Image (cartoon, rainbow, N blue to C red):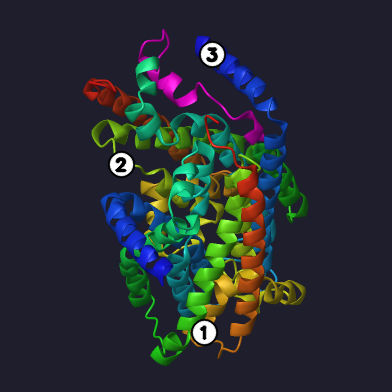
Amino acid sequence: MKLLRLLAAGFSMSLRRSVAFRVNLVFDVLLAFTGLGTAIAAVLIVFTRADTLAGWSKAEFLVLIGTYQLITGLRTTFIDPNLSWFPETGIREGKLDGYLLQPAPSLFLSSLSLSSPLQLIQVVLGVGVLAWGIGVADRSPGAAGVMSWLVLVMAGTVVTWALSVLLACLAFWAPKLQLDVFYHSAWQLGRYPTDVFARPLRILLTYVFPMALIASVPSTALLRGPQLGVLLAAVGAAAGAAALAALAWRAGLRRYTGATS
Amino acid sequence: MRTAVLLGFRLRQEVLEWSGAWWFLLTLVVQAVVAPLIGLFVWSAVYPDDPAIARYYVAVILVTLMTESFEQHTFSERIYNGTLSHELLRPQPVVVGVIGMNLAIRAWLTLLGAPIVLLTGIALQVGFDWWAVVRSTPYLVLAAVLVFLWTFLLSLTAFWTDRVHAVVGFGSQLVFLFGGTAAPIGLLPDGLRRVAEVLPFYGMSGLPAEIAAGTRGGGLLVYQLMWIVGLVGVVMVLWRVGIRRYTAVGS
């Protein structure tokens, strides 16, 4: 509860900082629109040549893009402002030292205390595309589908947070290793169903770097109905990833000796 | 001649400086290849029996690696942190340093990305007509110039706004959609294809890739040259207006 209050306070402060720069809001909104428009256009071009792609219909693709955009929006709003370029800002420039002195868990402060409220526009746009996809789908999703989609989106968000923390933790052992560009590039793969990719990449995206959980799995559950096994596996993966992230953070902190020491 | 010598020195300096950041360069390689790789998988799923698709996208990956530009990081950041002043005090055009760094990064990306291109080609059993690859060289050179001019032009907006990354991001989206990465130009719907063939983005990526892949004979050098002339003109005007606006940190 205390952490939720801290999160809300951090969000409120970030929001006040953001609205002071209204021109930036225009840029962010425009970029969010054009980014999403480009992604949708790329898919719609494919569907001028084919009725389905790797077994996915146009409506299913729209649902997938909407879901992907929603989780991407949550990531860029709440996670990226904290953990992007962590080896440089957190370790080498010493921001982590400041967090360690504050009376709240350092993992929370390092990974969730700042936010970029303007990026929530991506979430809004994602929901819009999701509604468009559901609207043009052959059959509407059932209550069970919607519920499982919600659970899977939450699991996907937790996995996203855990992956970001794990990448940041690498900085405790290799402060010069900067994997942000790699992470954000690999993230792009989540915009397409894993069925599109070749088998080795599909296995990698399902079990090693679980981008499938970000959009493919929730979208499948929403439109094709839930599968209990998949739901349990996703919740298990989220719990496992979060525990692993917390353990790695603790192990990293034991190694950490301060930015200037 | 003097400028060419200065550029040579700068290129050597930048190549050596970047050699210490090979791990970061490797992540830039991954960033460059992801979009064409997705295009490759998507269009191979649509046309599984067409070897031209794989050949085209392997060429796009190579073209992308050889033409990547990051002036929003290498140049615009100098405007933001005021170190552009150091470049302005040197007895040489500022653009020499920008081009030197651009060429050095491209050289490293090509070198580090070559194994990925080779592995993709072998895995997909892609065969090239080497005469077509040779014929694509002037188109590739002009594509590299076009990409640099486009990115540099957008990076110059840093004189007016601190959201240069959003501006360049928007420019990259146009290149992705109309340049032949999202889909080969020939597969675009008619209206979109006609627009794409007129805009400069096709000349930045899809055109040299199509020629290297052997799906187009050539004959569009004039189209690329015209866009280069146009973009050089706009860049020069923007530079002159922007540099008058520039105020060094502390002044």
- Residue drawn at 55 percent across, 47 percent down: A215
Q: Are marks 2 and 1 on the same chain?
A: no
Question: Is residue A197 within the magenta segment?
Answer: no
Q: Are marks 2 and 3 on the same chain?
A: yes
Q: The C terminus of chain B lies in which quarter of the figure?
A: top right
Q: Secondary structure at mark 3?
A: helix
Observer-nearest residue: A160 or B250? B250
Q: Secondary structure at mark 2?
A: loop
The tag on residue A6 is 3
Q: Position of residue A201 (x, y in %)?
A: 40, 59
Q: The N terminus of chain B lies in which quarter of the figure?
A: bottom left
> Between marks 3 and 1, how big is the CA–CA gap?
57 Å
Amino acid at dot 3 = Leu
Amino acid at dot 2 = Leu
Observer-nearest residue: B193 or B103? B103
Above or below A3: residue A250: below
Q: Are marks 3 and 1 in contact (CB under 8 Å)?
A: no
- Residue drawn at 72 percent across, 74 percent down: B189
Judged left or right of residue B143, residue A247 is left
Dot 2 or dot 3, earlier in sequence? 3
Judged left or right of residue A220, residue A176 is left
Q: Which residues are magenta?
A: A99-120
Observer-nearest residue: B88 or A58? B88
The tag on residue A177 is 2
Q: Residues within 10 Å of mark 3 (few under 14, many from 20)?
A: some
The tag on residue B211 is 1
> Between marks 2 and 1, how big is the CA–CA gap?
38 Å
Q: Are marks 2 and 3 in contact (CB under 8 Å)?
A: no
- Residue drawn at 40 percent across, 57 percent down: B101
Residue A55 makes an appearance in the image: no
